[in-house]
Image (tube, helix red, strand yellow):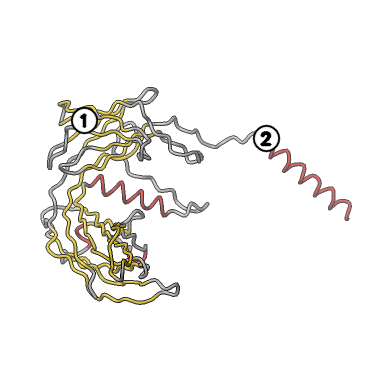
Amino acid sequence: MLRNLLFAIFCYCALVAATCERPVELPFDIPDPRLVVVCNFTGDAFFIVQVSKSRSALDQSPEEYIANAKVDIYQGDAFIETLELVPRGGGIRTPHYITRELKPKQDVIYTIRVEAPGFETVMAQSSIPKATEILSFNLSDIMVGLTENGDLRYDYNAELSFADFPEEVNYYHLNLYQQFLAFQLVEGDTTLIDSTIQAVVFSNSINNNFVLAYFKGGILFEDKAFQSNRIVIPVAVQIDPESQLIGKVYAELRTVSEEYYKFHQTLNQQQSNSGGAFTEPVIVYNNIENGHGIFAGYNASTDSVSVRR
């Protein structure tokens, strides 16, 4: 009995070892790489375009940017400008292409066309929608308390109302930015020495069918998410009371195109995907013909308010 068991274990180990040495054949074909183009543009600001190479899901190498592409912008079918490459270096971490003359205008359809050796030429179209006005922006229920490590924690509700267009389907990306003021004591007086602004990143606990906490900051939502055109969002931030003061809160309400909304919505779902064996893969929305990525316009309204106890 023992002899048979040992023989079975030996055969199993030999089978596993043989399998490990055998080259693995994937049950699917890895597609040829394509151009990935990313450009979110807004009014009176230059077009900034990142061009990279797509990777398979099995490729864990760093993102490979394309520095020899030809990036052209058209208004309708009329050529306007070829973008200039800004290479990595001198504080530039991500190489990109930029217009030097053209700044897009609202309600104008722009076309991007990108060529690079070894890749199919890609194209996309989009425009900047009309901006939605922020009617009011306030903070309420402000509470301040000490954390276990001695930091000051500020909890407040950010309340924002806006003038939505009821006759249209509208999409939004609301960003909140918290200002932090660095100080030092000079002969007993408080002297401000620096100011930084950080995007507020929200917990997924605020998510519902129409509101989505974006992984890079802010929330994505449709106009039907709030019938009263009013948003109340809980915010929590911390400062070191020995070297920091809390400053203003800045609100940026982006009225975005449908392609902007769908791309960032599905990208957020992909980033939040656990990637387990029983998890459905998320297909990121794409409006780049023959490639991947996003070319989408948005318009923004801004406001700010101070944090007062």
Is 151 left or right of 276, judged from the image as shown? left
Does 233 sit left or right of 145 as displayed?
Answer: left
81 and 115: which is toward the camera: 81
Find numbered disc 2 in the image and state the secondary structure of the residue it sits on.
loop
- Provide residue 247's location: percent of width, then percent of height: 25, 64
> Which residue is found at the position 22% from the left and 36% from the top?
125
Q: Earlier in the sequence, mark 2 or mark 1?
A: 2
Secondary structure of residue under mark 1? strand
- Residue drawn where x is 31% and y is 57% of the image: 198
Q: Is residue 27 found left or right of 40 in the rendered image?
A: right
Q: Which mark is residue 256?
A: none
Q: Nearer the viewer, mark 2 or mark 1?
A: 1
Circles 2, 1 touching at the beta carbon (< 8 Å): no
Q: Amino acid at mark 2?
A: Arg
Question: Residue 283: percent from the left, percent from the top?
Answer: 38, 45
Instruction: Kindly identify the amino acid type of the residue bearing the numbered disc 1.
Output: Ile
Measure how far apart labels 2 and 1 are at the Cα level.
Answer: 50 Å
Q: Residue at x 38, y 36 (%)?
A: 89
User: x, y percentage for residue 107?
Assistant: 12, 41
x and y percentages locating residue 212 in the rendered image? 31, 58
Residue name at image x 16 percent, y 38 percent: 104
- Above or below, 294 relative to 222: above
Along the viewing direction, whichever of 190 and 122 lies nearer the viewer:
190
Residue 73 - label: 1
**Residue hosting label 2:** 22
In the rendered image, which quarter is residue 100 located in? top left
Image quadrant where residue 121 sits: top left
